[in-house]
Image: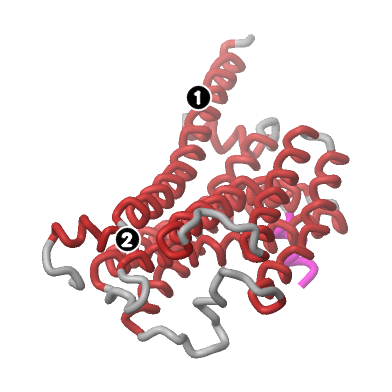
Amino acid sequence: MWRWFHEWGSPRYFYARSGRLLPYLAGLTLLLIPTGIVWGLLYAPADYQQGHSYRIMYVHVPAAILAQSSYAMMAAAGMVSLIWRLKLADAAMQTAAPIGAWVTAIALITGALWGKPMWGTYWVWDARLTSTLILLFLFAGVLALRQAAGPSQSGGRAAAVLAVVGLINLPIIKFSVDWWFTLHQPASFSVTEKPAMPIEMWAPLLAMVIGVYGWFFWVWLLRLRQEIREREVRSEWIRQRYQNEF
Amino acid sequence: MSFESWGDFVAMGGYAAYVFGAYGLTVAVGVGLVAQVWVRKRRWEQDLRVQLRAQEKQP
């Protein structure tokens, strides 16, 4: 177990092994996201109350779920970087932050675009929306701290501490609709409960949720592998690899 | 298809700007983030190629 952990902590080992996953993740993304979009936009039935505006759900809900998961993953990488001082964990945290920030921004903007026709306003300072906005600020904070520090380890540690402390916001986002009276509806999608929607409505949503996870891990691995190349550019194994290619 | 015609689909029940705006933004960011890392990799490879050639020319 420890040997496995240490092997995967080595940038060279990780770089070699992770490359094999890329075609599968790209395939999953390119299969499920277009399927989910076409299914959600064209074939899912209209909602009896919200009409066709509810189709925004097929991009908003996956983005909102992924925003929280990507934060948890970033914080886990930050924790590993703090405890074991693994350079790879620091790179994993640094490369997850911008993707998570963009995904959170999409969740907020698509939510606003859904809110305007349904609530009559793009934004309300309700608990779910406000805690998700805080999530965006946390991503931005981690990103800014990590980038400002450059290659210094102390900057990486400060960003990791912020990422770990920010974890407290995740249960607040999740339970905000239960703890406070909010305009936001309860969760549309749960892995433990039977969906309230008919299958024609939730099947495209499931395709989109799995598809965006595939996309996230694809983009994150692409960025992480590029970060490894840049950090290890003076290493013999990178130079040899490219010397053969050029 | 849950629409009577393509015209109905484009109108999206009067919510076209919101629905297509949300999908357009999501797809643009999704494709943009993949393109960004691809461009970064290409630039890095070009720089490395120049460095490696310069090293080879050195006696």
Residue drawn at 31 percent across, 67 percent down: A52
In magenta stretch: residue A6:
yes
Image quarter of the N terminus of chain A: bottom right
Instruction: Name the image quarter holding residue A41.
Output: bottom left
Residue drawn at 70 percent across, 74 percent down: A180
Q: Amino acid at mark 1?
A: Gln
Residue drawn at 77 percent across, 47 percent down: A87
Q: Is residue A2 above or below residue A82?
A: below
Residue drawn at 70 percent across, 59 percent down: A8
Q: Is residue B49 left or right of residue A3?
A: left
Count all numbered tags in the image, as a single digit: 2
Q: Chain of mark 1?
A: B
Residue A19 or A72: which is nearer the viewer? A72
Residue B43 or A17: which is nearer the viewer? B43
The numbered dot on residue B46 is 1
Image spot of residue A219 (x, y percent): 52, 51
Image spot of residue A243 (x, y percent): 54, 30
Please give the residue where the numbered disc 2 appears in the rendered image.
A34
